[in-house]
Amino acid sequence: LIEAVVRDFMAKKILQRIDLAYPLETIGDKLTQRRVTETADDAQEDNGLMLEVWKEARRKKNIAKIVRAAEGKFYDQFSRTLQKHFAFLSEDDAQARAEIIAVLYEGSYLCRGMADNTNEFFLKPLYQNIINGLFSIRNIDQR
């Protein structure tokens, strides 16, 4: 039963991440909105459930396997989407960017429940500048 709940929950999270992450021009706005205004009961429950899933994944190999599979599916899907829109990205470049965007997503998700000390006016362009910098050819060519 626990495995089924984790599978369903992780599938839902993958769809939410992909929806959040594209189009790239809107990520700063979406991350800011999630952090500042999303306080619905179901979002609070998702926050708690995600923490529990991560905790269980650290303790139980079968749950860790489900989480890894879901994460892998997200990275593969999102990386392919990035490569379609940014032909100059290698598979490794796309996967690295997918991971950074996922970290921003999950971090904003966890911060949502904390006290909001940052003005949205200042936060939104910073998020967007991070995303824009990830896809600058100059940053890719520096390897």
Image (cartoon, rainbow, N blue to C red):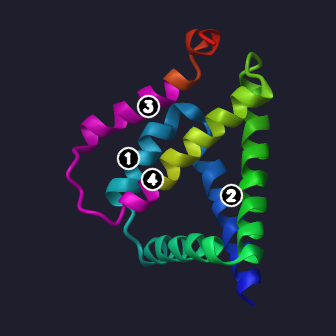
Tell us which disc is closer to us: 4 or 2: 4
Specify the amino acid type for callout 4: Gly
User: Closer to the N terminus: mark 3 or mark 1?
Assistant: 1
The residues bearing labels 4 and 2 have C-alpha atoms spaced at a distance of 15 Å
Number of dots carrying numbers: 4
Q: Position of residue 94 (x, y in %)?
A: 71, 31
Q: Which secondary structure lies at badge 4?
A: helix
Quadrant in the picture for the C terminus = top right
Residue placed at 75% from the left, 81% from the top? Answer: 3
User: Closer to the N terminus: mark 4 or mark 3?
Assistant: 4
Specify the amino acid type for callout 2: Ile
Q: Position of residue 29 (x, y in %)?
A: 42, 41
User: Closer to the N terminus: mark 3 or mark 2?
Assistant: 2
Name the residue that disc number 2 marks: 14
Segment colored magenta: 108-132
Specify the amino acid type for callout 1: Thr
The residues bearing labels 1 and 2 have C-alpha atoms spaced at a distance of 19 Å
Instruction: Residue 109: say if magenta.
Output: yes
The residues bearing labels 4 and 1 have C-alpha atoms spaced at a distance of 11 Å
User: Closer to the N terminus: mark 1 or mark 2?
Assistant: 2
Name the residue that disc number 4 marks: 107
Place residue 87 in its image quadrant: top right
User: Closer to the N terminus: mark 4 or mark 2?
Assistant: 2
* CB contact under 8 Å: marks 4 and 1: no
Name the residue that disc number 3 marks: 128
Instruction: Residue 57: say if magenta.
Output: no
Q: Which secondary structure lies at badge 1?
A: helix
Name the residue that disc number 1 marks: 32
The residues bearing labels 3 and 2 have C-alpha atoms spaced at a distance of 21 Å
Place residue 80 in its image quadrant: top right
Q: Position of residue 68 (x, y in %)?
A: 74, 60
Q: Alpha-carbon neighbours of circle 2 within 10 Å: few (<14), some, or many (≥20)?
A: many
